[in-house]
Image (cartoon, rainbow, N blue to C red):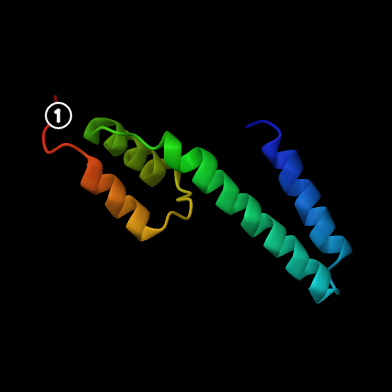
Amino acid sequence: MQPLPEIAAQIHEIADLNGEDPIALLHLLRTLEQLHREIQQNYFQPALPNSRQALYALLRDIEENGGWPYVQRWKLQALFANLPETEE
């Protein structure tokens, strides 16, 4: 996670350089949205916990540290539907 502040700074710099060009800013936003979607689908969703205890720990961490990534509601519902009723 160390390079994230540098990447964020670069994105801000790109936005600043294109601050008066709505087409360039739209392209930047579309690129960020595509990256978000790819990370969500290819990495975040497969990494979601498959037990109630692990899911609770993840949700507690999100609540304590802030920053809920955009997760479509139906995907969370599908996760809940696949959880066993009782812990084994």
Would residue 48 be found to the left or right of residue 55 on screen?
right
**Residue 67: image x %, image y %?**
48, 49
The residue positioned 43% from the left and 54% from the top of the image is 71
**Residue 88: image x %, image y %?**
14, 24
Rendering quarter of residue 52 = top left
- Circle 1: residue type: Glu
Dot 1: within a 10 Å radius of its alpha carbon, few (fewer than 14), some, or many (20 or more) residues? few
**Looking at the figure, which quarter contains the N terminus?**
top right
What residue occupies the far right of the structure in this picture? 17
Task: Give the labeled residue for mark 1.
Answer: 87
**Residue 20: image x %, image y %?**
85, 74
Q: Nearer the viewer, residue 54 or 6?
A: 54
Rendering quarter of residue 74 = bottom left
Q: Nearer the viewer, residue 69 or 34?
A: 34
Would residue 77 be found to the left or right of residue 86 on screen?
right
Q: Secondary structure at mark 1?
A: loop
Q: Is residue 68 above or below residue 85?
A: below
The residue positioned 36% from the left and 53% from the top of the image is 75
Q: Is residue 32 above or below residue 2?
A: below
Rendering quarter of residue 60 = top left
